Amino acid sequence: MIHGLARSGVGLTAALNDCNSSVAIFSGTWKQLTVKTQHALSAWAAQHPQRMCGLIQSDLPSLTDFGAGESPCSASDVLLIDSTRNILIRRGKEIACSAADVISLLDDPSALAAIAITGHGAESYIQFGSGWISTDPDPRLPGAILSPDVIRAPLLFLNACSCLRLGDSVVPRQYSLADRFYRRGTTVVGAFRNIQTSVDAARLFAEGITAGAPVGEIVNRLNAEVLSRQALIPPFQLLGVPQRRVAPAKTAYAYVRAKQDNSAALALAGQISWVEQLHHTISNWFEPSARLAQSFLELKRVARPLFELCHPDIANLLAPAEIGILVDGATDAVVHHRNNILLELQQKIQTGRWLESYYGSVSNPRRSRSASRRGELAPTMVHLYEPFNAATLPVMRLDCCARGTLAEWVGPRPTGRPKMRVGIDNVVIDVPPLKNAEIGAVFVHRTSDVGSQAWPPGGGRVSIPVADIPFHGRVTVVASVIGERSLCFFYSTLFVERPYGSASTADSATGAGPSNGPVRASKRK
């Protein structure tokens, strides 16, 4: 037992360093139960999993419940309450409870071993389902106000911000929730600082209770969990005796928190973030079509639940089947929007525009570097277009002095490149296999009369009949591909002559007959 040290002048940290016990209890007046004191105790306990600490108010008359120590309660049920659901932990199982069920449980003081309340809170109030528990009868809070007297249990976890900020709080003692419960003989667990409230913390609390662990050990586990998530200061403290147990040390019905695998959601969240940024980039180039705008709204609709699923506390609240439904729905939305982005840009290219005419005007003057390789006949350059809007993505463009534009891309530089050539009757495009989740298409620049063809996922050959191309001469064939974090357009400019027996627009205008020369189609050198 460490008593208030104001008279002795010995620092609390020094006293804890000299402590040979695994249990440290600070006994002091209300004014001595400061944040600094609580921090020193919790930091000392966090150094070893078997350590426990707690606070005792020395300026209150002794109450029998404070010294219960190892004596368990007759009940072993734990009630978890938050703003979305009420869960009763009974015999190791979770049971959903209605508001009426909660009232019935609270009416019987012997029905529960512990209660955990999770929500928004402060020193004088805490969210309780759709209402609030408050020591102030007129707290200006949105919802029904309940008296703290409705809560009766040997152990209470106030899982909210600052509910255990005590002696140095701006809130007077008579308004402190923790003090009100403590005076009634309840052992109180709470945070002495602001926290990121976690529903999973309440489940970890219940796991410890039903396993028969001492309350001080449970509080140390709560702090260890917070510190494992890069927190600087352990937030939780105990007002009461840390050795106290509220369930038998050995029980056949220990509760174990569900720990769900959300790795698929984490991977998909990265894809969604990139596709959203790509959409904003394209929206900076031109006004998206109604189809693309609607597709983006659908993506945003499923994105938020998917991002929430990335939080382990939320994932642990769901069944594997529920997680699967959310991931599948978000995956479909991502693929659908990627398809629409590819189609939108394809249509811009088919109307006769180069994409550079869109992104070049909203980018800084391009910066170029040589990309020539040994043995190439003509110099090749890579241009970087950095957008004025720093929230959007840059574009890279590959140009050859002899062959013109070869590729444009956003994201990592593409590795495999389609090979295109002109045959007697067809333009032949040999495409490499697509990577996982990539989709692609092959089409002709400056015309939508030639339908686009899907890029075979396993690679292969795509052919465009020369007779289907409405114009001849200089023809640019485009192969487009979009992946999880990349977008690329490959270009190849070919020279395609008119098939035998066809008439050009110029021939028709002058009345000239069809050419009687041989059929020739060649790749431009």
Image: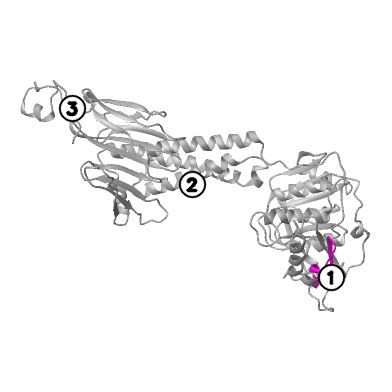
The residue at the point 70 percent across, 59 percent down is: 161
Question: Tag 3: residue type?
Answer: Ala
Image quadrant where residue 44 sits: bottom right
Is 22 in the magenta? yes
Q: Marks 2 and 1, how far apart in space? A: 51 Å
**Residue that numbered label 2 is attached to:** 273
Element marked by disc 2: helix
Residues tagged 2 and 1 counted as in contact (Cβ below 8 A) = no
Disc 1 versus disc 3: nearer the observer: 3
Image quadrant where residue 240 sits: bottom right
Question: Tag 1: residue type?
Answer: Gly
Q: Earlier in the sequence, mark 2 or mark 1?
A: 1
Q: Position of residue 326 (x, y in %)?
A: 58, 37
| Residue 397 badge | none
Q: Marks 3 and 2, how far apart in space? A: 45 Å
The residue at the point 39 percent across, 50 percent down is: 393
Name the residue at the front extreme. 374
Question: Tag 2: residue type?
Answer: Ser
Quadrant of the image containing the C terminus: top left
**Residue that numbered label 1 is attached to:** 28
Element marked by disc 1: strand
The residue at the point 83 percent across, 75 percent down is: 5
Assess disc 2: are there few (<14), some (14-19) or many (≥20) residues with their C-alpha within 10 Å of its C-alpha.
Answer: some
Q: Earlier in the sequence, mark 3 or mark 2?
A: 2
Is 394 in the magenta? no
Disc 3 versus disc 2: nearer the observer: 3
Q: Marks 1 and 3, how far apart in space? A: 96 Å
**Residue that numbered label 3 is attached to:** 521
Magenta residues, start to end: 16-32
